[in-house]
Amino acid sequence: MRRPLLVASAVLVLGSLAAGCGGGAQAKSKDQAPAADAPRTSAPPARKVVIVVDGKRQEAMTTGSTVQEVLSQAQVQLGQHHLVKPPLTAPAGETIKVLRLLSAPVTKTVKTSAPTIKKKNSKLAPWSTKVLRKGKPGVKVVQIAWVKRKGKKVKAVVDQTVKRKPVAEILAVGPQSAASGSAARLNWKALANCESHGNPKAVNSAGYYGLYQFSLSSWASVGGSGRPTDASAAEQTYRAQLLYNRVSGRWQGQWPVCGHFLFS
């Protein structure tokens, strides 16, 4: 009588296990969706980049994102010493410049001269000047290296950075016109040809300067500053005419050999 009960129990247990297994598989299929495929990454499209190597321009199609990647794809050899703009690790723009050097660059800090701005001022004496604002030199950092140019090895500035811009000097300048009156009607060109062959930079070892061979004392007596040879030809003529008027036309004491040309 007990054996049928054992058989029945075994059947019930096996049925429960089968139901449990089947139910689990069904729950899994209902609760979990099949895994989606991983997204596929596509390579960026190729684009055109201009590469200037030692002054020579070339174009390259590239997918590189950094300067170094672009140069590698374009098979640009950098060498031991080089300057690259933008830097190798920077994002690549539309243009990359490469300068291959023959030596390591040397960095120097140098001053740049200040420009001069001249402003006319009718209240000043003719040809005189007055500083309205002093100039201030600029400062820049330069890199100097040996490079190859036109087949020759030369030393050149290969890069520079402005640290401070120069401040221009502002200079007020008086009227710069020729003198008037009877002295202006004389033949000053002929006198200059005789005295200096018409050379405003002429210097005589005896101490005479410029178109009309001024002595420094006679030049200063008519308002000239510095040396006559530092002044323009027009200013030298202006002051020669002032000198003529100052000595009341007695040209013999100023130009004893050539003065007669004034009346030719």
Image: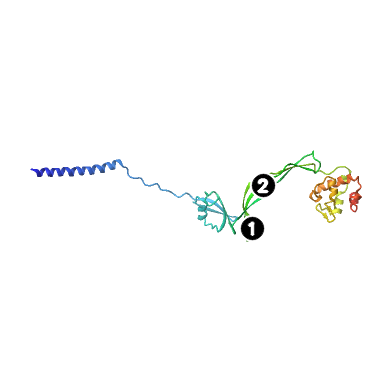
Return the x and y of residue 163 as percentages of the image width and height: 63, 47
Name the side, left or right, on which 139 lies relative to 80.
right
Q: Quadrant of residue 18?
A: top left
Q: Confirm whether residue 264 shows in the render.
A: no
Label 1 neighbourhood size at 10 Å, few (<14), some (14-19), many (20+)?
Answer: some
Measuring from the top left, give residue 58's x and y in whole percent: 56, 54
- What residue appears at the point 51 percent right and 55 percent down from the top-left corner? 72
Q: Secondary structure at mark 1?
A: strand
Q: Give the alpha-carbon distance from disc 1 to disc 2, as whole Å.
A: 23 Å
Residue at screen point 28% across, 42% down:
28
Quarter of image, res 148: bottom right
Disc nearer the start of the sequence (1/2): 2
Q: Dot 2 lies on which element?
A: strand
Q: Residue furthest left?
A: 1
The quarter of the rendered structure image containing the N terminus is top left
Q: Residue 263: horizontal and vertical position, in percent?
A: 90, 49
What residue is pinned by disc 2?
138
Colour pattern of the rendering: rainbow
Tell me which amino acid carries mark 2. Answer: Gly
Mark whose residue sits in front, 1 or 2: 2
Q: Nearer the viewer, residue 58 or 4?
A: 4
CB contact under 8 Å: marks 1 and 2: no
Residue 175 percent coordinates (x, y): 80, 41
The label number, if any, that marks residue 187 in the structure image: none
> Which residue does the image show at 24% across and 42% down from the upper left?
23
Residue labelled with disc 1: 155
10 Å neighbourhood of mark 2: few (<14), some, or many (≥20)?
A: some
Q: Is residue 155 visible?
A: yes
Q: Residue at x 90, y 49 (%)?
A: 251
Circle 1: residue type: Lys
Count of numbered marks = 2
